[in-house]
Amino acid sequence: MTTHLPTFDYRRPTSLGEAVRLISSGGSSTVVMAGGTDLVPKMKRRQLTPSTVISLSRVTEMQGIRYQDGATTIGSGTLLREVVASRLVPEPLRLAAATVASPHVRNTATIGGNLCLDTRCNYIDMPEGWRIANGHCLKDGGDTCWVAPRQERCWAVHASDVSPIAIAMHTNVRLVSETGERIIPLEDLYANDGINNLTKRRDELLVELKIPSIEMRASYYKLRRRGAIDFALVGAAASFALEEAGSAEDVRIVLTGIASAPVRVFEAEQFLVAEGLSPGSIVEAAGIAGSCVRTQDNTDLGSRYRKWMIPVAVQRVLEGLAMNTNERSADRGTD
Amino acid sequence: MVSPHLVVGERHPRLDAMDQTRGAVIYADDVAPPGVLVGRLLRSPHAHASVVRIDTTHAQALDGVIGIITGEDLPTRYGILPISQDEYALALDTVRYVGEPVAAIAATSATVAERALALIEVEYEAMASTLSLRAALEEELPLLHGDGVGRNVHRSVALEFGDVDGALRSSHHIEEDVFFFRGNTHAALEAHSATASYSPQGKLTLTSSTQVPHYVHRTLEKVLGLPSGKIRVIAAPVGGGFGGKTDPFSHEIAAAKLAMLTGRPVKFTLSREEVFYTHRGRHPVLMWLKTGFSADGNITAVHFRSFLDGGAYGSYGVATLYYTGALQATTYRIPNYRFEGVRAFTNKPPCGPKRGNGTPQPRFAIECQLDKASEALGIDPVALRLRNLVEPYSSTVNHLRITSSGLKECIERVVAASDFDARHGRLADGRGIGIAVGSYMSGAGLPIYWNDMPQSEVEIRVDRGGGVTVLSMAADIGQGSTSMLATVVAHRLGLRMEDLNLVTGDTDLTPIDLGSYSSRVTFMAGNAALDAATAVRQQILSVVGRKLEVDVADLELAGARVFVRGDEESGMSWSEAVQLTIASDGPLLATGSYRAPELAGPYRGSGVGISPAYSYSACVVLLACDRDTGMVEIERVWLAHDVGKALNPLLVEGQIEGGVYMGLGEALFEEQSFRGAHHRGPSLLDYKIPTALEMPPVETIIVESDDPEGPYGAKEVGQGPLLPVIPAVANAIHDAIGVRIDEVPITPDKVVAALRSAERGRSTRFGPSGVPAFEFPEITRVEPPVGFGVT
Ligand SMILES: Cc1cc2nc3c(=O)[nH]c(=O)nc-3n(C[C@H](O)[C@H](O)[C@H](O)COP(=O)(O)OP(=O)(O)OC[C@H]3O[C@@H](n4cnc5c(N)ncnc54)[C@H](O)[C@@H]3O)c2cc1C
């Protein structure tokens, strides 16, 4: 029954250069910590026992929100509380960030930590004694995924509330390591694998998000049990460009809480590009999303219910968008 | 003008309100004697296994480990009920659930203690485990208690009052349903904590977050083999009990034993995970209920079967089993009644008492079924309830004595306040309103262990300056029992609450009170306090009467003065009167006590359910249900509660609101559930207690029926208000969307499943389909009380 943190070395670099140096010289048992709201509970549960923890909280290059070169740039170390409150941040992103956890958590949690959030599952996010008693799962050093024992992969779920809206809004992220840096679409940061869910190298830091100023409507709908604290049962973000700028690439529907990565529902996106947004096409697109995405019994309320909720979430987020653009009066918001 | 009634009935903040607000209350985990060691428990990873060998050598060798004990160090069995002495503080040779304590460590730090746990080697021999009611009652599996294989039945009961079959045969309408209440846990904010120290003179002191210092005291006496005078148990202020701190626990006994062995104080504070394994929460109960009605809606007979999943140990379970069948008759007049029940042992953390012990489950079943019957009979649900109400000052078919009852008024007032008649069946699709009622005991009529002594004693001491100290073992678990004692005594003595000193919950200092369970404290300790205060009052008045040469009957005690009625300037101050009394009679102290009247009926098992008085409640819930997601949003709750007399309306409202909160959590969110032998989520992220955002406005309505035996007419309010909330939610959901969810908690997946089934033209109900094949014992037939008219 462990209730205390394991012991580790603690480093607090104040510059990005120092941070990336520490990481590349640290071994595989070195981890970085931003707000720690995901990392620290995992360490208490002994899902992780790193030898060194590098805190990013004092790295100035990771702080702050600014508008620059036609994009909103948000430092990865920006607190979710600040994201929610900032007028520089596009509203759909602020509203999505406001659905993360609770005010207490958002006071400490960062947007970078949210995007790099580890995948979650009923069998992994458990106390140590529980995992010993149940038998360690694949992600936990065992050899079986308890969710789907006959398959050879881990099905743990991507749970970020910010990633879907950020992807829908064409966000790029800047990754920096000691050897260089690159900017990639946020979408490409993720891999649909519960264990290796991030495509970035271990020694790369996510330094900032860049949200381009494209004329678009975007919205996020989060279905959750309680009005605070809970992760999404299903989360759906959608965006589309305004008519004058509209083109086939510009409709996006992104789901969270379903697979090991954010899921883009291309079939539904393409359908909407072809059909346009109408009450009828929304229902049909939602149906398409429901039929082409699978769920597993690995978070709250089981897979069947969450499968049922995919079209509901997609329909609601699209209705919210339609309502915004067409000034059509509808009786439901997007939460 | 000095008002003679200046305390009872007034709104007073709790005496500890300011300390609570400032964080100044010393909870059990705040206790930090010098040199205190950190205790940790090693817990079983197996649901059912023999403990073959435990080797602690490596752990012992770790620097900073001061003591380790295992089952062999505490080989005496105990249990809260004399009939269920089935627990060991640390598993002796068998573990029966994942998380059961196996060994205990005292070390110089938490880090060392936790490291040492991993170094204890335990060899287990796993055996097949029993994980469901059906497995326990239908399959041949290794027995949890006893050798060999068989049915894991803990206890069963079959009682019949009147002629159920005959009455059902001649009934106009019969409702038959199966319901399942999945069970949940207390989730008190404060995790259990206990600190023990042992003096060189051989005195053991245990400070614990417990609701029952007296029962912990008795258990320590038994398990440690110490005389009772060598044990002092102090009940620290409890940060939420709800029945979860009403058993003697492993960590309390281990702390005591390790303190004795090491000579140093030892503290155990459970982690949140451990609290879920310690459990003793709401039993999962599967229920089959068959009720007959006459054409005009009178209940003719009830046949009720309950199947309880008890977990691995007895705890209060035998009482819980009987409670599932006992209190149905206190709200509605049931002329013929058959109750069959069984409690099973399963390899899961033990269930026990949670707020309403054994009664929310059948209350859910009865109140939902009444609504179904109301539809079938074409009688409005309020009218159907009103026409079946038990009369005040009557007797039930199962021999419960009913005194005051304000149930009719409770119903009428919630119906009026909520505009129920105009709304029920008439709201827009997706919105609904539902009603239900409930009733609970004001203290169990009998103590847990058989004895002839009072159930509660209070002592009052008055010092020479007029200072008053009230001593009672009643444990304040946040319900405000200490303030209640102050209210009663201050009112009787014409003083203010804040003038009194209260000493509570300490077995060395305070006279007995059996503990804070079964809603007994206001009724029993309150009466004992009134008794003691009356003695002090009489003594003072008679001395002052002699001095002033006036008749005692003409004297008044109010506003800290003793005076001749009608002339407040006459007489003397309270402190002068006290000094006069001490000069005349010697030390001014008095004791008072309470013992419930003899109430047991003429049958075995009649001891459960009897109470000197019953509280009554009625609840209306207004909600919205999202047809697509199945999510329910509670818009408003009205709850009327007959508390007899509100000694302090502020605290009564607090208890009602808390009961509503807990009821809503049980109705919609909370579930202590397992995947096989493993808890589905022993954390407050996974165990969904409602947040402040889920809590709707609550309109509380206090009904006062003035109970003839309650202190100043008061009855209970700690548990009763929870009961009607759960079925009122279920009934409102049906009103909103036309489907029946016959299983608690009513989670969104069940709602959507029922709606989808209804859309396809199939069942409009979600719930269990049947009950296990179990042969109940032969029915014991009991004559209804004399004069109980059978229709
Ligand atoms: C009770 C509770 C409820 C929660 N509910 C939600 C919810 O509803 N929705 C939701 O999305 N999340 C939720 N979370 C998860 C988490 O708190 C948030 O996602 C949070 O934003 C994580 O940010 P952090 O700064 O605390 O991350 P950390 O815990 O510091 O880090 C998370 C991970 O990201 C890595 N990391 C952090 N920063 C960087 C960086 N700059 N570059 C590379 N890697 C990095 C860390 O190494 C770590 O692996 C919840 C957590 C708790 C405890």
Image (spheres, rainbow, N blue to C red):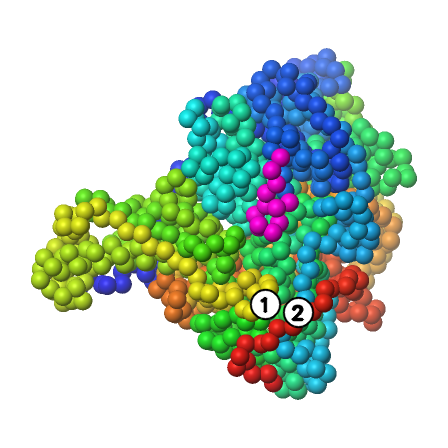
Q: Quadrant of residue A282?
A: bottom right
For disc 2, the neighbor class at 10 Å (few under 14, some 14 to 19, many from 20) is some
Q: Amino acid at mark 2?
A: Thr
Q: CA distance from mark 2 to mark 1?
A: 8 Å
Answer above or below: position of A266 versus A137. below
Left or right? Give the position of B489 relative to B91. left
Residue in front for this viewpoint, A34 or B748:
B748
Q: Main secondary structure of the magenta part?
A: loop
Helix, strand or loop at label 2? It is strand
Asked if the magenta segment contains residue B295, the reply would be no
- Residue B627 vs B153, above or below: the answer is below
Amino acid type, residue under disc 1 in the picture: Tyr
Callout 1: CB less than 8 Å from ligand 1: no
The span shown in magenta is: B75-86
Residue B87 placed where, x, y %? 63, 42
Q: Which mark is residue B50?
A: none
The chain identifier of the residue carrying mark 1 reads B
Asked if residue A109 shows in the view, the reply is no
Q: Which residue is mark 1?
A: B603
Compared across the picture, whether B176 is left or right of B37 comes to right
The answer to whether residue B46 is left or right of residue B519 is right
Residue at coordinates 56% horizontally, 69% vertically from top-left? B602
First of labels 2, 1 by sequence position: 1
Residue at position x 84%, y 57% in the image? A287
| Residue B400 place in picture, x, y as percent | 53, 70
Q: In which quadrant is the N terminus of chain A drawn?
A: top right
The one nearer the camera, B569 or B747, is B569
Q: Specify whether B287 is left or right of B3.
A: right
Badge 2 sits on which subunit? B
Q: Which residue is mark 2?
A: B780
